[in-house]
Amino acid sequence: MGKFEPQLPIHSQHEQNHDGSSVFDRCSMGFCRLFSFKCVFVLLLGISVLSTGVFSIFRLRHRRYEFDAKASIMNSATVHAYFRLQKPVSYLLPRITRLEYDIYSEIGVPYTQVAILSMHKASESNSTHVVFGVLPNPMNSSINSMSLSVLRSSLLDVFNQRFNLTLTPSIFGQPSSFDILKFPGGITVIPKQSASMWMLRQAHFNFTLPNSVREIVENFGELKEQLKSGLHLKPYESVYMKVTNKAGSTRDPPVTVQSEMPPELPPLPVDPRVGHGKEVQKVLASTSVSVSPLTSCKLL
């Protein structure tokens, strides 16, 4: 005879199945409730992290294309200057310290320090507008007059392209479009001409133009020729000029142009109704040089 297992009463089987199903259902419902809570929590957490990440991406993207120093550094910078680099801001940001070191090595004077004041993306692809400042060291002191004089001379040499601002070529390349933005006491630029004639103070007059030093320098040859023609100078005679911006900027107007003429120059034709100053104004007004109209003129 084969083995057999005793059969439980039908009632007992039903009760056992019913109890098992109830336990399973209760466990399933509890698990689902727990799972649903976790899902919701994870979902909300994911959305929060994602939104924060997106915000961070945009914030980092914004920072990637610009840099501005603290206001305290900006305000402490006695001198401001500008140049452009053919490198993106994102490339330059981790190299700010090296850039400051290179600039100081070129134009630094004792008891000063160089700080990058701003870097902003230029319209040209992968180019950056860089503004740096020269600060006293320590910052709560001031730059003495002798150091300022040496620094002014160095920056003007760079602006006049008599001296190159050389940075580490393998890192930064060659800077371009150098401008002085701020210098205490103003700056005076002497365009390329014979400096010896400045000792001949015979005919001397000043006039003011609502232009920048850079605009005057870039159009200097044409301006000079027009003045020579208007003043009826002989072929061997000339007009010698200095250009001054009182705020110490090569980029911002206005400028005062100081002019001198050689002693052999005959007297300016004078209209008795307007005088010498107005005569010079008429000559300048008749020129075709691409500078703004004369605003004031004084014959000395």
Image (cartoon, rainbow, N blue to C red):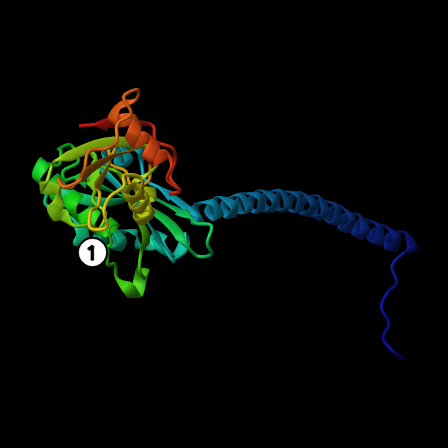
Q: Quadrant of residue 275?
A: top left
Picture coordinates of residue 168 (x, y %)?
26, 62
Nearer the observer, 294 or 188: 294
Q: Residue furthest right?
A: 10
Task: Judge from the rendering whether residue 276 lies leftward or rightward of residue 65; answer left or right.
Answer: left
- Residue 114 as seen in the image, left or right of residue 69: left
Residue situated furthest top in the rendering: 273
Foreground pick, 299 / 53: 299
Q: Is residue 206 left or right of residue 176?
A: left
Q: Where is residue 199 drawn, in percent x and y?
A: 9, 41
- The quarter holding residue 271 reads top left
Q: Residue at x 10, y 40 (%)?
A: 200
Residue 239 locus on image (x, y percent): 22, 43
- Count of marks, rendered view: 1
Q: Is residue 246 visible?
A: no
Judged from the image, the secondary structure of the residue bearing numbered disc 1 is loop
Looking at the image, residue 211 lies above or below residue 221: above
Looking at the rendering, in which quadrant would you find the N terminus?
Answer: bottom right
Q: Is residue 212 visible?
A: yes
The answer to whether residue 238 is above or below residue 173 is: above
Q: Does 229 sit above or below residue 17?
A: above
Tag 1: residue type?
A: Phe
Q: Kindly identify which residue carries mark 1.
A: 163
